[in-house]
Amino acid sequence: MNIIEGSFQAKGKKFAIVVSRFNHFIVDSLLEGAVDALKRHGSVNDDDITVVRVPGAYELPLAAKKLAKKGDFDAIIAIGAVIRGGTPHFDFVGECNKGLAQVCLESEIPVSFGVITTDSIEQAIERVGTKAGNKGAEAALGALEMVNVLSQI
Ligand SMILES: Nc1c(NC[C@H](O)[C@H](O)[C@H](O)CO)[nH]c(=O)[nH]c1=O
Ligand SMILES: CC(=O)[C@@H](O)COP(=O)(O)O
């Protein structure tokens, strides 16, 4: 039986992190977790990490598409925090995953999903490094593994 699975090792590989500024007090911790994971687990050089900031989660897919089209990156990590408010706006902004998945499939470049969608600030805080881990780091680990897996297919 042949099994293809990836390690996290990615020295020399290039990563773009597209990060939304909305809820920056949360997103900053997601970004920190993602960069830490790339460096500590992937041995990725600082110069091989590019951070692109956009206003909000709604803008993540367009920035990811432009980055994928440049062809300079082995993977893209999308980081954001969509926190439910008092209107259905959450339901629309949170759908940025559909655009990100489309970029991933069309470009055949891994676009990992580090956008948290929570009903409360407390839930968001739990997902940036307290009770529920750091979702930015998780997204980075997913990108590291996919770069390796795709290189073996
Ligand atoms: N409410 C949140 C937003 N809203 C802003 C949109 O993402 C977008 O930037 C705006 O509609 C202009 O096009 N964005 C988040 O990332 N998180 C939110 O909770
Ligand atoms: C996720 C959102 O768009 C949200 O922050 C907007 O808040 P509101 O629904 O109260 O306008």
Image (tube, rainbow, N blue to C red):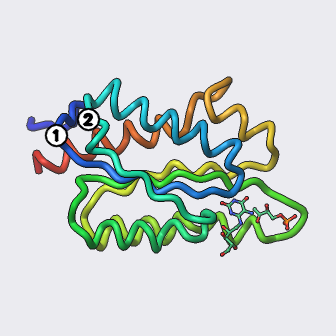
Residue 136 shown left or right of residue 76 in the figure: right
Residue 128 x, y percent position in the rendering: 63, 34
Residue 148: name its quadrant.
top left
Asked which secondary structure carries label 2, the reply is loop
* Pointer 2 local density, CA inside 10 Å: few below 14, some 14–19, many at least 20: some
Which residue corresponds to mark 1? 12
Which residue corresponds to mark 2? 45
- Tell me the residue at 80%/57% (across/down): 84
Residue 6 shown left or right of residue 130 in the figure: left
Residue at the outermost right position: 86
Residue 149 x, y percent position in the rendering: 20, 44
- Tell me the residue at 21%/66% (across/down): 71
* N-term mark: 2 or 1: 1
Q: Amino acid at mark 2?
A: Asn
Q: Where is the N terminus found, in terms of image quarters?
A: top left
Residue 93: name its quadrant.
bottom right
Residue 117 x, y percent position in the rendering: 67, 52
- Tell me the residue at 72%/35% (across/down): 125
Q: Give ligand 1's quarter of the image.
A: bottom right
Closest to the observer, 43 or 50: 50
Residue 94 x, y percent position in the rendering: 65, 63
Closest to the observer, 52 or 100: 52
- Tell me the residue at 73%/49% (across/down): 118
Please say if 56 is above or below 19: below
Please say if 29 is above or below 97: above
> Do callouts 2 and 1 mark residues in contact (Cβ within 8 Å)?
yes
Residue 12 shown left or right of residue 105 in the figure: left
Marks 2/1: CA–CA distance:
7 Å
Residue 21 shown left or right of residue 8 in the figure: right
Please say if 106 is above or below 109: below
Q: Amino acid at mark 1?
A: Gly
